[in-house]
């Protein structure tokens, strides 16, 4: 028996041959409406005396959408001037992201962006993340192109798996191969057997644009000790996963350390990668100061400015873009990033979308927010195993001192922002004694009921990022 269609998303209507495919909302769920001959699986519905298939948003439906409509499939986009990673841990922010980016066409989004850590903490898969991005693009009718990032991957197996799933960017996290102890080794313990690198770097000065990068012998030996094994692994990854293929871009990440990547070290890393034949579209150093999760930059802005100008010049010299990790909410330095890179950069954000979502909960369901916040306080120490923050819980106002109307303000205060930021996985995966989710289902129901509120919050918050990074809405 034919059933009703639901309310169509007008922006989703995509002509195909003599007909169209589009998306509808019906009883709290979204569906694809398509001619039956296209192969979508679902129930039969009737429209204007023609039969259509009303298909739920399954993985199979996403795969078919990507096949039928190339704009629904991720592309290699890192060569575009301004790119921004918009890691959507919940799978519900993509449509708002697309609609925002329609007003900022100078930016290209990486809509599917998740690390293995994030997947483990949220119980999602790389298929889930890419499918959510595909449906968001189709729903919004976004035609600007988007990328998919297998973020902070550390093993060849994980890289190959994400590439096979269609990811168009890999962020290679080299932190497991970086010798962090070499940062503080005495000069007398830095000596290494001489090789061809010595003459290339030791006691040399490199002119790049109007900046000189001086590398003493000590600088060179320290860089070689810190990054030598990491560079070997990067070369192995390149040869195993990328050489001879043009389906994905490579980002090199050396930012997951406690000490900054000096301009001399960045030159050494970029030069050695290039010399070994590794082609990388972006590189992420560890900047001076603190790029902590969900809050503004902490540190000496003058020192940051000096270093990022050198870093950006080095990146341009080696034909790549600078990548800024943990880029959410770094409002004080965004204009500097845009200027130093001459408007060519990649910026990663993720957790700030989750914080916007939790602000919606604080406003729409204060009782639920109070329970989640209390749980976060109880489990903060566990969350600190996954993220490095300087949160002072003593500065987080006690819940019993706050009215419901004051709860949203917690998401504007640094310490409480970080409390909620890093506990997201524990909150989403918390279970009751019977195995049911403690918070997850109620949270998603509230976000569904307040979808437009969440979209508006994202438009304002992420829009502020884009504006300070030099974009003007059209």
Image: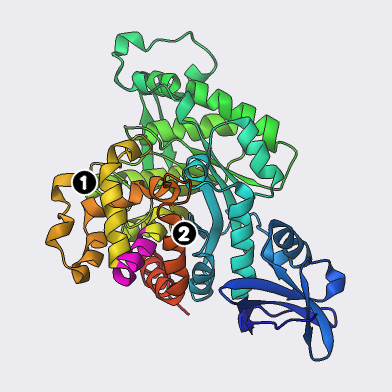
Coordinates of residue 26 in the picture (x, y in percent): 61, 78
In the rendered image, residue 362 lying in the magenta stretch gets the answer yes
- The residue pinned by badge 2 equals 441
Of callouts 1 and 2, which one flags the residue occurring earlier in the amino acid sequence? 1
Snapshot colouring = rainbow
Q: Quadrant of residue 138?
A: bottom right
Q: CA distance from mark 1 to mark 2?
A: 43 Å
State the residue lying farthest toward the bottom. Answer: 48
Q: Residues within 10 Å of mark 2 (few under 14, many from 20)?
A: few
Q: Secondary structure at mark 2?
A: helix
Residue 126, numbered circle: none
State the residue lying farthest toward the right. Answer: 37
Q: Nearer the observer, disc 1 or disc 2?
A: 2
Q: Residues within 10 Å of mark 1 (few under 14, many from 20)?
A: few
| Count of marks, rendered view | 2
Task: State whether the magenta stretch is mostly helix, strand or loop.
Answer: helix
Residue sitting at x 40%, y 43%: 311
Q: Quadrant of residue 307?
A: top left
Q: Nearer the viewer, residue 18 or 337?
A: 18
Above/below status of 48 relative to 236: below
Coordinates of residue 67 in the picture (x, y in percent): 77, 62
The residues colored magenta run 355-365
Q: Nearer the viewer, residue 449 or 209?
A: 449
- The residue pinned by badge 1 equals 300
């Amino acid at each position: 028996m034919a059933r009703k269609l639901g309310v169509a998303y007008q922006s989703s209507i995509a002509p195909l041959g003599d007909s169209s495919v589009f998306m509808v909302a019906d009883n709290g769920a979204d569906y694809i409406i398509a001619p039956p001959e296209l192969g979508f699986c679902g129930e039969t519905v009737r429209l204007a005396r023609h039969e259509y298939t009303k298909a739920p948003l399954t993985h199979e439906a996403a795969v078919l959408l990507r096949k039928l409509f190339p704009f629904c499939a991720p592309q290699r986009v890192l060569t575009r001037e301004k790119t921004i990673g918009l890691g959507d841990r919940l799978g519900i922010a993509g449509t708002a992201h697309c609609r925002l980016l329609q007003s900022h066409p100078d930016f290209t989004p990486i809509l599917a962006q998740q690390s293995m850590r994030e997947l483990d903490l949220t119980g999602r898969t790389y298929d889930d993340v890419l499918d959510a991005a595909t449906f968001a693009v189709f729903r919004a009718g976004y035609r600007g192109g988007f990328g998919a990032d297998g973020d902070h991957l550390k093993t060849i197996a994980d890289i190959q798996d994400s590439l096979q799933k269609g990811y168009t960017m890999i962020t290679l996290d080299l932190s497991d191969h970086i010798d962090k102890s070499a940062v503080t080794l005495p000069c007398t313990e830095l000596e290494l057997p001489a090789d061809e690198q010595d003459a290339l770097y030791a006691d040399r000065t490199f002119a790049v644009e109007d900046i000189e990068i001086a590398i003493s012998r000590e600088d060179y030996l320290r860089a070689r000790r810190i990054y030598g094994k990491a560079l070997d692994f990067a070369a192995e990854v390149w040869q195993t996963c990328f050489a001879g293929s043009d389906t994905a871009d490579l980002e090199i990440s050396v930012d997951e350390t406690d000490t900054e990547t000096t301009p001399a070290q960045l030159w050494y890393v970029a030069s050695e990668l290039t010399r070994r034949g590794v082609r990388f579209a972006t590189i992420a150093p560890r900047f001076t100061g603190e790029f902590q999760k969900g809050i503004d930059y902490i540190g000496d802005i003058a020192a940051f400015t000096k270093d990022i100008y050198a870093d950006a010049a080095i990146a341009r010299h080696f034909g790549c873009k600078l990548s800024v990790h943990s880029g959410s909410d770094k409002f004080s330095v965004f204009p500097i990033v845009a200027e130093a890179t001459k408007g060519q950069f990649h910026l990663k954000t993720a957790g700030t979308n989750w914080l916007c979502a939790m602000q919606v909960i604080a406003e729409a369901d204060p009782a639920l927010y109070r329970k989640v916040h209390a749980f976060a306080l109880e489990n903060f120490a566990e969350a600190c195993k996954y993220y490095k923050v300087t949160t002072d819980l003593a500065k987080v106002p006690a819940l019993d001192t706050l009215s419901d109307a004051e709860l949203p303000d917690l998401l504007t205060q640094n310490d409480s922002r970080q409390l909620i930021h890093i506990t997201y996985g524990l909150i989403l995966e918390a279970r009751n004694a019977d195995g049911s989710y403690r918070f997850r289902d109620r949270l998603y129901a509230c976000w569904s009921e307040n979808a437009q509120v969440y979209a508006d919050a994202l438009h304002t918050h992420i829009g502020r990022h884009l504006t300070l990074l030099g974009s003007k809405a059209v």
